[in-house]
Image (tube, helix red, strand yellow):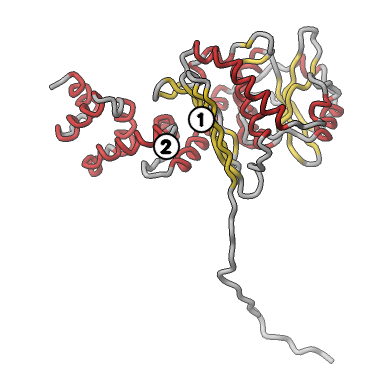
Amino acid sequence: MSRTEREIAKLLPGYPANITKPVADLIDRGVIDQNTVVTVREVAGRKGERHRFLYHLLLVEGLRKQGVPVDDTVMMAREAGRKVNLHWSPARWRDEHNRLARWATLKKLAEAAVTYDLADVEAKLPDRWPGYLIRSSRRLGMEGLRQRHCVASYDARIRLGSCAIAVVFVDRQRYTVELRTDKKGDLSVVQIKGRFNRAPTSDVQQRILEVLGLPWQEPVFAFHRPNPERNRQDALDTLRQVLPILRAARIDRIHVYFDGSGDSGMIEEPSFYQGKAIIKPDEIEVLNVEVPGTGQSTRELLDKAFEQYLDSTNVDWYNNDGGFGEFTLDVATGHFEAEVNTRYTESSCEHAEAIELEEPREQVA
């Protein structure tokens, strides 16, 4: 028995040799790895399905080659007590990953139950304004779920005092606002996002600045003259800027998926890969390190670049049936691919009926 066969026998106790030996052979040939074996064991390892184990291995490996975060989804589903189906489509897997990732973020923030010290920020805001400061990790997690954006990733920065998050209401619409204090101690607004990470109109932005009594960190006219080509170029320049940092961290590629359909629509957080393995963002230290001359971390620059590029396409991906797509950045080669799709739904009347529930009443002359 080879070394690989012995390792597989430990991973799959009770499995017959006509399964463990071919599995070991697939690993030795580089077709699959042990992560695939563990994933299939978790999802389809019941005795009644063991005869299909090899088929399920190749099914999962095919999904992984399409950039589907199968391993991560299975792990989070186990923690959440949810079931997954290996026969789901890639889109269904990504949707489940998206849902579970939000659940995991909220659970983590809620369990931490951290209360933020915002006394300095509060002192620089008006006594009354249409909104409130987010004062706890639980509230931050809920804001991300409600607005379908990645504001929950700001938890560490708020704890360090480098920023604060406020909720502001304009015309009954909710906006998430990032506040920062500069080196002089002056507070300003640096980012405003609506649902699905959408930027506000120039009018809404100005009204938010007025009710908070704060300046914008950058010239306001930049929002009065939207320039898709400039947004596209800025996004690509930002990606070029972070490539050396990502290469030094041994990141091979990045996938970002987005889907604007229904209440589950959002731009997902990036998935970082080393080979076939997904690396958790918390394990990549450079993501939270400020890039010299930018005032932003590597993670912030990536988020900004993907959002800017999506805006530059002028595709209405967040309304009606919603659009969907993905970005792929091959860090090693610097190759960037983007795909933005829209949905169109046709309808036809399959049933129509008019019923009088009561007998017609006689009209009085």
Q: Is residue 59 left or right of residue 18?
A: right
Mark 2: few/some/many CA within 10 Å (<14, 14-19, 20+): few
Disc 1 designates what residue? Answer: 104
Q: Identify which residue is drawn at 68% across, 23% down.
A: 234
Q: Identify which residue is drawn at 18% across, 18% down.
A: 3
Tell me the amino acid under the disc marked 1: Ala
Q: In this view, does 220 lie to the left or right of 162?
A: right
Residue 205: image tag = none
Q: Return the x and y of residue 320 as percentages of the image width and height.
A: 65, 49
Quadrant of the rendered structure where residue 72 is? top left
Q: Which residue ends up furthest to the left in the rendered image?
A: 1
Tell me the element at label 2.
Answer: loop
Q: Identify which residue is drawn at 50% across, 26% down.
A: 271
Q: Distance between the residues labelled 2 and 1?
A: 12 Å
Query: Which image quadrant: the C terminus?
Result: bottom right
Disc 2 designates what residue? Answer: 81
